[in-house]
Amino acid sequence: MTANTTDTGRRGGADRGRTGLLLLTSVILAGCEGQQSALAPSGEDARVLGNLFWVMLGGAVILWLLVNGLFFYVTRINRAALSRRFANGLIVGGGVIFPTIVLGGLLTYGLSIMPDQRAPGDGLTLRVTGEQWWWRVEYWPEGAETPIVAANEIRLPAGERSEIRLDSARVIHSFWIPSLGGKMDMFPGRETRMSLKPEVAGRWRGQCAEFCGASHALMAFEVVAMPPDDFNAWLQAQAAPATSPTTDAARRGARIFAREGCGACHAVRGTGARGAVGPDLTHVGSRLSLGAGTLTTTLADFERWIAHTGAIKPEVEMPGYGHLGAAELADLAQYLKGLE
Amino acid sequence: MRRVMQTLMVLAVLGAVAGGAVVGFGLFNVSARVGHLPGVSWVLHTTFRNSVRLRASRRDDMPDLADPSLIELGARHYDAACRTCHGAPGETPSATIAAMVPAPPMIATAVADWQPHELHWIVSNGVKMSGMPHWPATRDDDVWPVVAFLVSVQDGMPGDDYAALTDLPAPRAPGDYCLGCHGQGGSDHVPPLEQQSAAYLEMSLRAYLDGTRSSGIMAHAVSEVPAETLGGLAQWFADRPAEGGVLPDMPAERIAEGRALAQAATGDRDVPACQACHGPDASETSELFPDLGRLPAPYLRTQLTLWRDGKRGGGPRADLMRKAAQHLSDSDIEALAAFYATLPPQDGK
């Protein structure tokens, strides 16, 4: 009886272990797919990096097989003493010449793809500034005098190479869209650059890749590549001032926005709100995420965010407006959601 | 050795029993009339003096103690909070106060041979078992006005000057007591109140009352007023016509710098536009945001510094201002104070 229980228990444990392992494997494998994976490339640069990864991995596997094959050969298959001449040849050939050729080849290949990673863009320039913890984004179409300001979302024309200039406000961040290309650090007071060429239209996710403070993990952004015509239409819409609120609730919300002084930090172009401390909200209603990839832009999430900023995003600069009533928060959400 | 230990144990037990009896049966005579045994007063007083000298250190936030508006503010607070025990300059103690043990020294004696930073320590910390209370606020930079006044008493302030300095308007209306400091456009360290909305004033009074806004001076003042009359008091001030203080003399480039900062025209991405909540030209802002126009520059400077350093509270919206001020530099504060001190108050309360 006792033995039986123990046995079942042990088997249960083994089952759980196996299930856990399966789960873990599938979770890890799932990481290779989807919106934020260097192994599922959708940009020219990411594809080159992906190829580099597979070539390096292939090289590593072959070398591993050769080395371990050799061990297996001398310990299991042919245990006899090797001739001195053969042993010397093996050491010089397998220990010096062969690795030099293989590693030299891989290094040459690896280095050869580096210049292309810094290819200049062919039209649009983006300036992205890392803030704690969000992304200030400016679009500079060719020949533009003033930028079109947005935030927390990167849109690119598919099939074109866009220049991206990076800097940071306070601490070091790193700009990374794994599906489109490599990452590049962002330094306060020093501009770095990169360029990206999405091969197809699609939607991915980027993430700050350098620990930058309490809410580093919540500093993400959505990335959208659009056919060039769609992109130009979108950019033109972004350049336009905010639309006036159309419903009573949204109008009340606009008054609350002014009354509570939201314009001290946020700009809504076409209104009195001119602040530059936080994200430009002129078209926030049409964005894909809120709080830099943290929440969605549903009415409920707008309300949640405004009332509980610090609980959702630790140490965030924006104060929470929990002192507003539920009806006021709802009106404010209607106004912001309407800023499309 | 063993015998010694046993003797010590017995003595310890006897001592504990004796001590317990003193406390439990009330054997110690607490009569102030009987007073202390010979020598005890000397021990206590010497301990007090040495303890203050050990703990009071020179502070780098000491303002100019000869500033007349600082002295007046200190004198008025002293008159309301401390005079009962320590008397006015030239005054003799009342019979009741003189019968206290220890008897509080009259002001001229009390302040003799203390350095300003030692006076600051005593007023801020109070003195245990002597009846001297500590400063009724967590913040203690606002102890300096009292120290400024005490130093001028050391310098021999006559009773007539004191009377003129602490004169109150004849009591006719609920806010007359407040007008002692806040009347006639306030002073360098005290804001005029007439330009603020009743809602803002009441919120501030309640914040002083519950300690969310820290000030030893205002904590005392607000506790002198029945809590249920605070709303009416706020309304009384809001209904008064503004007296229009004197336009302070500020360097033009400082003012321009402050204006640019307040209107977010400097490209500074750390400082929110003050203008969005405090004007100028901000229509429809919450009546809970104060109008900063013509507030005295030293007062603005102190408040902005407190906000920046996280020492200032207020109503439920205090966090907005705390976050807004957290990246201000000293020179930003200087510029903003110059700008708002010279800006006319807005009309809409």
Image (tube, coloured by chain):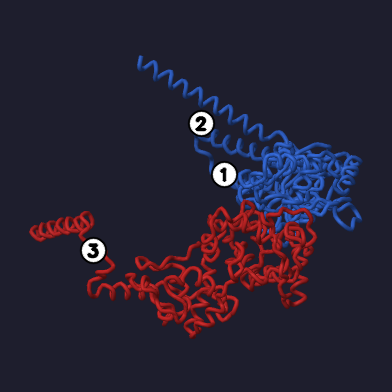
Residue occupying the point 90% across, 44% down: A232
> In terms of sequence position, does the residue under pointer 1 or pointer 2 come before the other?
2
The residue beneath circle 2 is A76
Q: Nearer the viewer, residue B289 or A204?
A: B289
Q: Position of residue B79 (x, y in %)?
A: 50, 72
Q: Which type of secondary structure does the marked residue at label 2 adopt?
A: helix
Residue occupying the point 63% across, 39% down: A63
Q: Chain of mark 1?
A: A
Amino acid identity at mark 3: Asn
Q: Position of residue B270 (x, y in %)?
A: 70, 60
Chain identifier, blue in the render: A
Chain identifier, red in the render: B
Judge the density around disc 1: few (<14), some (14-19), many (≥20) Cα neighbours within 10 Å.
few
Q: Nearer the viewer, residue A112 or B11?
A: B11
Q: Is residue B297 visible?
A: yes
Q: Is residue A52 visible?
A: no
Judge the density around disc 3: few (<14), some (14-19), many (≥20) Cα neighbours within 10 Å.
few
The residue beneath circle 3 is B29
Quadrant assignment for the N terminus of chain B: bottom left
User: How far apart in space, not on screen, are marks 2 and 3 (Cα)?
Assistant: 99 Å
Residues marked 1 and 2 touching at CB (< 8 Å): no
Amino acid identity at mark 2: Arg
Q: Position of residue A229 (x, y in %)?
A: 92, 41
Is A13 on the left-hand or right-hand side of A265? left
User: How far apart in space, not on screen, are marks 1 and 2 (Cα)?
Assistant: 21 Å
Task: Check residue A85 in the rendering and tell me which mark sits there, or answer none.
Answer: 1
Residue occupying the point 67% across, 68% down: B333
Q: Chain of mark 2?
A: A
